[in-house]
């Protein structure tokens, strides 16, 4: 039975010639888990919001959206609110109150549910998923992952029949993201609830989905079950979407002489089973994997015995933290939500002052009268890129920076940066009108115009599709090769493993481990990459990335099927 039917849907935002959605037709069956992916700005979030009529953007819309056989606009408001649930990308955007229980039942209270019904539903749901400890906390005390779980619980209390989620894991650490996906899997399989999920973090989602929709320029480019879509994209050599495929699937398709669509592995277990079936074995001595070395030389940033807390009655966010980042390093800091990663960056920038300890940037302590001068050589891209902008268009923001930098030809510099990131069409766009990925790239374009010696970036891959992430990696690699020091806070372990030269783990306010990516991630159960988990205890040496796995192929002339 079709719960959602979309026919010839088109949508155009005001004051734009381009359609965000173009004659799109598809359907979703009751109980399906549907994954929607595609480039930033291709219309994924717009499509999701059009299905949730209370959140539908303003603009010109044609075509039909039917929910349970009736047009969305024919349904009573209460039915639409209850039966079509929506979870936002940013957990903070959905939270109103500071008491967890009150936040959880806020929607039910507004719809007039009795106290008995509210207590019954809360008790059942919280107990089922084991989140009783959340009820004893304030919302402000929750981690990012816990806040997203709270949002999901609040929506589930209304017992929706279809659940829409817009990049719900984009701001979560790997463990919190895994917890959320496991919860969605239970909801789908045990309750039969229909799930439509928009996401860029795809490594583990193809295995959960019943059907995949790949969108491009407002249209559906591919749709089908996960293996059908993977097979079609790979066999057509479609470079637009090859990077969207799970690494274990791509490894199989590249290595097998005669790949079979039905045998394409979608998860770690299937990947390990396939590897064990191959009649060869490689030892580390057979391979030439680059181990990498930690940077030495002049320090770019130094922290010594730093303590920081936001208030006297709160625990220490940074505790006796010492750290040296050398000039020319590409330094990635990983750790869970709430571990202090963003706080650490802000302390490095003198935006937060430590209670104790010393901070040096380019060999100098911050001096009260020279802080702005000292920070001229440091650029910072915050986690929420909208806070980067003070002008009402992207071009005006870049012109503002160009004037400060005294560029001789500011217009050509702006055009070069916009073209470099593939966002020239955003030149006259208001920052608030950009998608998350578009905004991230626009902020990066502005930051690059500052010509810094040190770049601090907080979650640079958040909201970026795989192609945009590849473009970002190329840009950061180019800057790194020019000797610019890059300090990156990230939840994206695949990105850190592939591109950083040094990785550090922040845990309970301290740097608990610092090593090359291979040394830090190798052999871990969960805090590692998918390809590392696939190759652990297998017929090939442990690798971190698909690129390393493919390099192993060069060491054997033939991979028997």
Image (spheres, rainbow, N blue to C red):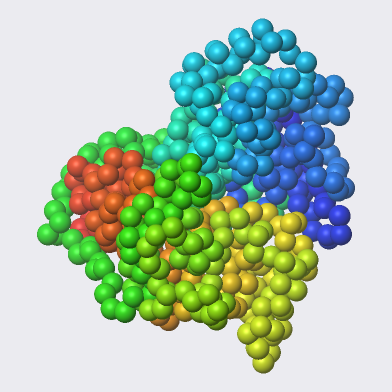
x, y percentage for residue 185?
A: 49, 27
- Considering every residue shown, the one lying at the far front of the view is 312
Instruction: Give 533 or 560, whichever is nearer the viewer.
Output: 533
- Image quadrant occupied by the N terminus: top right
At horizontal 73% and vertical 19% (from top left) the residue drawn is 109
**Residue 438, above or below 110:** below
Residue 344, compared with residue 363, is above or below; it is above
Counting from the top left corner in percent of width and height, residue 292 is at 25, 67
- Which of the 4 quarters of the picture holds residue 384? bottom right
Q: Is residue 16 left or right of residue 360?
A: right
Residue sitting at x 70%, y 49%: 43
Q: Residue at x 48, y 46 (%)?
A: 312
**Residue nearest the viewer, comparing 27 with 262:** 27
Name the residue at 60% across, 23% down.
Answer: 101
On screen, residue 373 above or below 537: below
x%, y% of residue 127?
49, 16
């Amino acid at each position: 039975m079709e719960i959602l039917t979309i026919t010839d849907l088109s949508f155009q935002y005001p004051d734009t010639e381009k359609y965000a959605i173009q004659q799109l037709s598809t359907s979703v069956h009751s109980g399906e888990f549907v994954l929607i992916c595609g480039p930033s700005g291709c219309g994924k979030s717009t499509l999701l919001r059009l299905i949730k009529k209370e959140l539908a953007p303003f603009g010109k819309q044609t075509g039909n959206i039917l929910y349970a056989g009736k047009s969305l606009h024919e349904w009573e408001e209460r039915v639409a609110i209850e039966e079509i649930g929506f979870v936002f990308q940013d957990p903070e955007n959905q939270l109103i109150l500071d008491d967890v229980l009150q936040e959880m039942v806020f929607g039910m209270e507004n719809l007039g549910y009795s106290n008995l019904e509210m207590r019954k539903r809360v008790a059942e749901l919280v107990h089922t998923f084991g989140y009783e400890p959340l009820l004893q906390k304030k919302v402000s005390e929750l981690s990012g992952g816990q806040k997203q779980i709270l949002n999901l619980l609040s929506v589930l209390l209304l017992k929706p029949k279809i659940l829409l989620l817009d990049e719900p894991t984009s701001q979560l650490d790997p463990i919190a993201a895994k917890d959320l996906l496991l919860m969605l899997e239970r909801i789908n399989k045990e309750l039969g609830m229909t799930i439509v999920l928009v996401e860029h973090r795809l490594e583990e989602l193809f295995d959960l989905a019943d059907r995949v929709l790949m969108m491009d320029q407002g249209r559906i480019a591919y749709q089908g079950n996960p293996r059908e879509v993977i097979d079609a994209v790979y066999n057509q050599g479609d470079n637009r979407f090859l990077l969207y495929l799970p690494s274990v699937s791509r490894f199989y398709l590249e290595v097998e002489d005669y790949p079979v669509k039905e045998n394409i592995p979608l998860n770690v277990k299937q990947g390990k089973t396939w590897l064990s079936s191959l009649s060869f074995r490689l030892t580390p001595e057979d391979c030439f994997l680059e181990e990498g070395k930690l940077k030495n030389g002049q320090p770019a940033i130094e922290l010594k015995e730093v303590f920081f807390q936001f208030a006297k009655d709160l625990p220490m966010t940074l505790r006796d933290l010492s750290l040296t980042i050398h000039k020319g390093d590409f330094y990635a800091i990983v750790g869970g939500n709430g571990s202090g990663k963003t706080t650490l960056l802000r302390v490095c920038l003198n935006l937060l002052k430590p209670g104790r300890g010393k901070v040096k940037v380019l060999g100098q302590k911050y001096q009260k009268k020279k802080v702005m001068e000292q920070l001229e050589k440091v650029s910072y891209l915050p986690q929420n890129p909208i806070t980067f902008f003070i002008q009402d268009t992207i071009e005006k923001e870049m012109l503002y920076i160009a004037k400060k930098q005294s560029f001789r030809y500011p217009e050509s510099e702006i055009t070069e940066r916009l073209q470099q990131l593939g966002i020239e069409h955003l030149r006259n766009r208001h920052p608030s009108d950009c998608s998350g990925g578009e905004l991230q790239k626009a902020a990066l374009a502005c930051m690059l115009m500052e010509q810094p010696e040190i770049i601090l970036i907080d979650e640079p891959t958040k909201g970026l599709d795989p192609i945009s992430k590849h473009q970002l990696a190329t840009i950061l690699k180019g800057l790194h090769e020019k000797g610019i020091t890059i300090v990156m806070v990230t939840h994206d372990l695949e990105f850190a493993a592939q591109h950083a030269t040094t990785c550090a783990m922040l845990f309970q306010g301290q740097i608990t481990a610092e090593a090359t990516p291979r040394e830090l991630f190798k052999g871990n159960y969960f805090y590692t990459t998918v390809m590392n988990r696939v190759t652990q205890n297998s017929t090939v040496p442990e690798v971190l990335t698909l690129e390393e796995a493919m390099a192993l192929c060069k060491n054997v002339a033939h991979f028997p099927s």
